[in-house]
Amino acid sequence: MRVISKSFKYFLFISIFSLSFFVTNNDRQDSIAIERINLENQSLYFVLRGSETKMGGYARQYNRYDSKASHIALGIFSDSIILYHVNTGKKEAFIKENLSDFIFSEKEEYDYLAIWKVKGVTASDLRTIKERIDHLDSINIRFDYKFDLQNDNKLYCSEFVYKALLGITPNLFENSIYTKEVPMDHRFFLKKDTITYIPLDFFVRQKRLVELIFEWKK
């Protein structure tokens, strides 16, 4: 009878575990190959995802250019990428997490992912941005369901990005504040006929300032 060594058993266990993880995530996300995403150290990113949920459908109606995205996070890569964003449905609106957790959610089914690199951001800029993010986190952010730009401690996802970057990348925000008529079925909740806000896809026409490095659609 052939004796199987402990090292071979360990190798077999790791191989099966790794394959199971790969298949599970591929089943849920239709093969988003995040290992193929090439991210650079000391860089700033916009990470957008789209959701098939009812709330995701509402959010998409306020986009100007990118009809698939429904949420945006700010990503800072310093040895590894950490995403910062403000979202609904959590005990705390401010969220800090890694890229995998942002993509592979157990509660939602996403059908879109895009990663944009912001050009010309220095290491000093990143330190300033991180300080601003820490400050925003310290004031106990709540999600802004009314989309009011005058509230400092109530923010929605693209407003959080705006406040974290304002002054660091001013050209990105040219014509970013937009006014549109509120859809009829949203007026009861928002209590207004028009809305002035920052669309989450405000930056995508600024091709000289951003670069699309990854995009996936279901």
Image (cartoon, grey):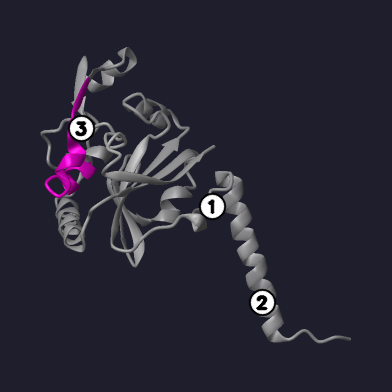
Depth order, front residue of 81/42: 42
Corner quadrant of residue 143: top left
Name the kind of residue labelled 1 in the image. Ala
Q: CA distance from mark 3 to mark 1?
A: 31 Å
Please give the label number shown on residue 11: 2
- Magenta stretch? 160-179
Name the kind of residue labelled 2 in the image. Phe
Camera-side mark, 2 or 3: 3
Please give the label number shown on residue 76: none
Q: Are marks 2 and 1 in contact (CB under 8 Å)?
A: no
Residue picked out by circle 1: 33
Camera-side mark, 2 or 1: 1
Q: In the picture shown, does residue 23 fall above or below 211?
A: below
Residue picked out by circle 3: 176
Quick one: quadrant of the C terminus?
Answer: top right
Per the image, is 196 magenta? no
